[in-house]
Amino acid sequence: MTQAEIKLCSLLLQEHFGEIVEKIGVHLIRTGSQPLRVIAHDTRTPLDQVKKALCVLIQHNLVIYQVHKRGMVEYEAQCSRVLRMLRYPRYIYTAKTLYSDTGELIVEELLLNGKMTMSALVKKVADRLTETMEDGKTMDYGEVSSTFVRLADTHFVQRCPLVPATENSDPGPPPPAPTLVISEKDMYLVPKLNLIGKGKRRRSSEDDAIGEPKAKRLKHTTDNKEPIPDDGIYWQANLDRFHQHFRDQAIVSAVANRMDQTSSEIMRTMLRMSEVTTPSGAPFTQPLSSNEIFRSLPVGYNISKQVLDQYLTLLADDPLEFVAKSGDSGGGMYVINLHKVLGSLATATLESVVQERFGSRCARIFRLVLQKKHLEQKQVEDFAMIPAKEAKDMLYKMLSENFILLQVGCQ
């Protein structure tokens, strides 16, 4: 990592978790994986404080651990995961846009706490929503639960790995660190909970003053504590799924700019149909038939099946090749070429950066070099129709900023 990235990680950790966690986190970022006692020795921090800091970092998926061959547990910081904390507001806003205030608070609580059980999360969100309502109104647990289920169904939240039951029942000595596993089919399986109740408002200071003492209330609450119905089943925000959503939004916007609103709505429908079935790193989406796409178009979007087929053909014949036809069954099978789309988006971003920094003529030269791969200076002048002196100056500017490279040919 660069020094700027390490400094940014340091500031993020300090802002969110305080100085001790920041010290341990930055130490692991700089040194790589290390065992517990080495961390305590190198940072000159008491062992119990190091343990607490590592617990916080592991809780928020900022540190992972693995058992060394010699039976020693080593801890390693996840730098990219720390930097993703910059996007927390965007994740929360996306949840609000898709699933209203309830979805916003669910994702916000998961990001603030790292991992939570569904029952604790539902109660906390219901209480927070009740606080914002008018007097006499409350938020039902069932409404929050239904929004949570929708988030799980669309993979925006996922289960955390668990200690397998076989490891718990093993009569031998426990391992130095537990091995956490979860199967793909269980990752988004929501437990069947019968959460009945409504959100509660916090008591005001006046109510506390005339009520029973705080210690007595705490003891009363502890004595009547009910067993947690989903104890041990923890959930976390699926940040990769949010990034997939951002990617899909960029694709829809690119199609709208290149063609029209109808084409972008068809693309949005295809991406929505594939969002759960296609892995985020897959080069293509799953094949979709024209009939399936037509049935999945938004309600009230009045285009005929014939017009849809024309638009799909237009998308498939476009030189950018965002959509490809993969078969003829079901009225025609179509896939989205995700690698081609992302390559085109990256190229467009590079061209806009060059244009902003060096001007439109430099952007024209840069675009030519991208298309032709290799060009001599005389060819650049001819193809871009730019005078030799100006072309030479522009090429030197981009070369000095490492936007293009100079390759010396051998005779």
Image: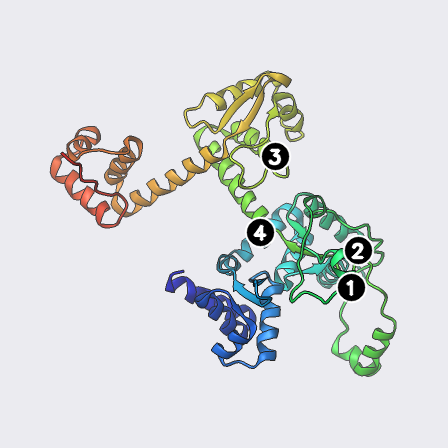
The reply to whether dot 2 and dot 1 touch (C-beta < 8 Å) is no
- Judging depth in this view, the residue of 328 and 205 nearest the camera is 328
Q: Label for residue 141?
A: 2
Q: Label for residue 274?
A: 3
Real-space CA distance between mark 4 and mark 2, rounded to the nearest whole angstrom: 25 Å
- Judging depth in this view, the residue of 253 and 38 nearest the camera is 38
The reply to whether dot 4 and dot 2 touch (C-beta < 8 Å) is no
Residue 362 sits in which quadrant?
top left
Q: Label for residue 239?
A: 4
Name the residue type under label 1: Pro
Real-space CA distance between mark 1 and mark 3, rounded to the nearest whole angstrom: 45 Å
Left or right: 87, with 48 as reference point? left
Secondary structure under tag 2 reads: helix
Residue at 49% from the left image edge and 57% from the top image edge: 80
Name the residue type under label 4: Leu
| Disc number lying in front (3 or 2) | 3
Q: Where is residue 311 in the image (x, y as percent from the top left)?
A: 53, 21
